[in-house]
Amino acid sequence: MKRSLAVATLLSAALFAAACEEAPPVLHGAGPGGTAGNGLAAPGVVPRVLAGGLSNPWQLTWGPDNFLWVTEKTGKRITRIDPADGSSTDVLDIADVSASGADDGLLGLAFGAGAVYVAYDYNSGAGLRGKIVRFNYDQAAASLSSPTDVLTDLPASTVDNGGRLAVGPDHKLYLTVGDQGANQYAGACAPIRSQDLPTAQQVTARDWSSYAGKILRIDPDGGIPADNPMLHGVRSHVFSFGQRNPVGLAFGPSTLLYSAEQGPRSDDEINLLQAGNNNGWPFVAGYRDDQSYRYANWSAAKNCAQLGYDADQVPAGVPLGPPETQWTSPDYREPLKTLYTVPNGYDFQDPACGPTYDHCWPTIVPGSLNYLPPDTPDTTLANSLLVPSLKNGAVYALKLSQDGREVQGDVLQLFRTHNRYRDVAVSADHTKIYIATDNTGLSGPAPGEQTGSLDNPGSILEFALTAPLATPAPLTGPSPTPIPPSNAPVTTTTSPPPTTTSSTPSFSPTPTASSTPTSPTFSPAPSATSTPPTSVRGGNPLLPTMTPSPPSN
């Protein structure tokens, strides 16, 4: 069915700034249906709403036909969009998808040889599960047919569900699986399984329950690749483990693989992945530095069901894990970058931010990840990772070193609007960026800003892929949205650079006393008369009301 979608031109935003130092100019222009937007504007930057009316667009990718293909998480359909005029076609509706409106639904999509692979959640006899399905792809007819299950009965959840799918240069499938929201809020009594590795008996029985909190590498037919890592003597689909909620995958220079991962209340991570690596969750969040995080194992408390989950007030009956620096694993690897690490003493329940404190947490809540190669015309952005933010309505550009093994220089913030950015795709000539936006939730580009509506819900936005013309200002602290508490110390240090120059993926060493990961520089705390900001993540309708209210990803 052909759908005619409004194509509108907006005056909107492409801003970068040091933390909490920007003035909010007003966005003027018509959004879909002629409505006015209310975002930030930069002179000379003219984006357009390529397509609207989508039901939570989730993965946005280019097809071999040079059209944009989109999965609609709650719409349960795959949509094909012409980048020239924004007209779209419903390619396929998948009634089997289970979509509650939270983190489950129709998720990842990737093209293979003559095929399209799709990741989605479904209701099985044992509850909610995830699967990958292969469809035959007819490019001339722009159609998908003959669905075949590739891998079924995967862990799935309405919270911290992962779901990003990619086909690698090696023609293998890569899928992210989150930790299922375990050990927090309504899932406080469920154990985190990110460190659990499958046994030989589980692999034989096709029991994939230990795949939560992992990144999987899968043969196109669903088999286990013969060169997958042996972990504790067992080869499975597990490529890396110790993840919390990995939501982005991108292949960079020399086929290096990167991931973007949502942190708990700080320490969103950008990771350089290697077969068999352990990212440390739940024993480590961000760098292994003992800063503002220690694992509290609520699920192991004898009276867990009677306890009210509160990350700031951990009862004596809840066992604590070792301090981060005392936990060790031979497979552990540091992240390339955290967004952001904060010092001990950070007040995650600053009264100025209540009652929805997550607005002030030092995170960006990444939606996905993409890579710009060295031949990108704008040299400021060439060889960079692009991280869309669900929380701040911005895309973060992280410049890589030539070998791709460290993040260098300033972090730029681009394309600021009142939207939740879920995924990004880049044109073949690397001059345009396309951004998929969520339908619901709160987001705001200005420090401490409140907004009850989104500029362009359920849309695909197109921006010219250029950095601002002014000299980039360093973003050395949390994003402009978080507001620091008055008791937060002001520190700025440098994260350790990688030391290896081998041809295989490598990682930064563990921080030492003389090499401390980056801590943010904060702006002054809000005054007593400041209006408390509203949560920009929104509440999860499937979770009970708590203090603080659980964020929705």
Image (tube, helix red, strand yellow):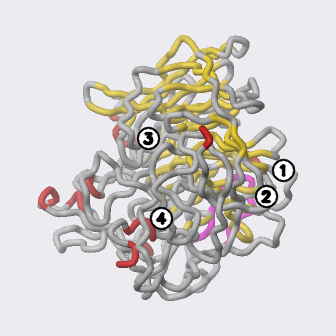
Is mark 4 in CB contact (under 8 Å) with mark 3? no
Q: Which residue is mark 1?
A: 376
Quarter holding the N terminus? top right
Q: Which mark is residue 381?
A: 2
- Tell me the amino acid under the disc marked 3: Val
Mark 4 vs mark 1, CA separation in Å: 35 Å
- Tell me the amino acid under the disc marked 2: Leu
Q: Residue at x 29, y 57 (%)?
A: 183
Mark 4 vs mark 3, CA separation in Å: 50 Å
Q: Is residue 326 visible?
A: no
Q: Residues within 10 Å of mark 1 (few under 14, many from 20)?
A: some
Query: Which residues, given as a range, are shown in magenta?
Result: 496-509
Is mark 1 in CB contact (under 8 Å) with mark 3? no
Name the mark nearer the viewer: 1 or 3. Answer: 1
What is the quadrant of residue 413 in the picture?
bottom right
- Tell me the amino acid under the disc marked 4: Gln
Q: Residues within 10 Å of mark 2 (few under 14, many from 20)?
A: many
State the SS at label 1.
loop
> Quick one: 228 or 536, which is closer to the camera?
536
Q: Is residue 185 visible?
A: yes
Is mark 2 in CB contact (under 8 Å) with mark 1? yes
Q: Which mark is residue 450?
A: 4
Q: Mark 2 or mark 3, which is nearer the start of the sequence?
A: 3
State the SS at label 3.
strand
